[in-house]
Image (cartoon, grey):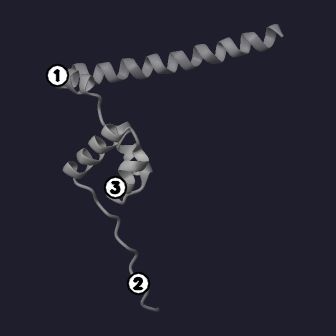
């Protein structure tokens, strides 16, 4: 077997770096500009923005006990599924009426 070079390790970003990147993106109103300033991929900042809880959600999540928070997550997932089913039903009815 040949000695193949090991693949480059993925760069890991710590929490303070992520927070700074999100702050820069929010201040500049441009994910692209923040990514260029930090020399990272703009998609990475977008992923962090989606994963970051909103200040209101973070405050509410901290106030809830784990059982209530889990129930809330389940109810929200159920509401999303029911909304999707409703949209599918509406489209099916609309196509039958045409």
- Choose the circle earlier in sequence order: 3 or 2: 2
Q: Which mark is residue 98?
A: none
The CA span between labels 2 and 1 is 49 Å
Residue 18, image x and y in percent?
26, 48
Instruction: Return the residue at label 2.
Output: 5
x 33%, y 23%: residue: 73
- Tell me the distance, in whole angstroms, between the alpha carbons under discs 3 and 1: 39 Å
The furthest residue to the front: 28
The residue that appears at 36% across and 39% down in the rendered structure is 49
Q: Quadrant of residue 36?
A: bottom left
Q: CA distance from mark 3 to mark 2?
A: 31 Å
- Image depth: mark 3 or mark 1 in front: 3
- Residue furthest to the bottom in view is 2
Question: Which tag, 3 or 1, sits closer to the chain's start?
Answer: 3
Pointer 1: what residue?
65
**Residue 37, numbered label:** 3
Name the image quarter holding residue 63: top left
3 and 1 marks in contact (CB < 8 Å): no
Q: Residue furthest right?
A: 98
Q: Residue at x 84, y 10 (%)?
A: 98
Front position in the image: 42 or 50:
42
Q: Is residue 72 above or below residue 46?
A: above
Q: Quadrant of residue 23?
A: top left
Residue 20 location in percent, x, y? 24, 47
Few, some or many residues within 10 Å of mark 2 (<14, 14–19, 20+) = few
Tag in front: 2 or 1: 2
Relative depth, front residue between 40 and 87: 40
Residue that appears at 64% across and 18% down: 88
* Tag nearer the camera, 3 or 2: 3
Residue 96 position, x and y percent, is 80, 11
Secondary element type, mark 1 = loop
Q: Is residue 21 left or right of residue 40?
A: left
């Amino acid at each position: 077997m040949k000695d193949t070079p090991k693949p480059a390790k993925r760069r890991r970003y710590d929490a303070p770096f992520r927070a700074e990147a999100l702050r820069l993106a929010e201040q500049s109103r441009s994910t692209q500009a923040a990514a260029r300033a930090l020399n990272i991929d703009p998609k990475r900042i977008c992923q962090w923005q989606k994963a970051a809880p909103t200040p209101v959600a973070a405050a509410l999540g901290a106030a809830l006990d784990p059982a209530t928070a889990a129930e809330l997550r389940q109810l929200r997932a159920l509401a999303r599924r029911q909304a999707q089913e409703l949209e599918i039903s509406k489209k099916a009815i609309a196509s039958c009426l045409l």
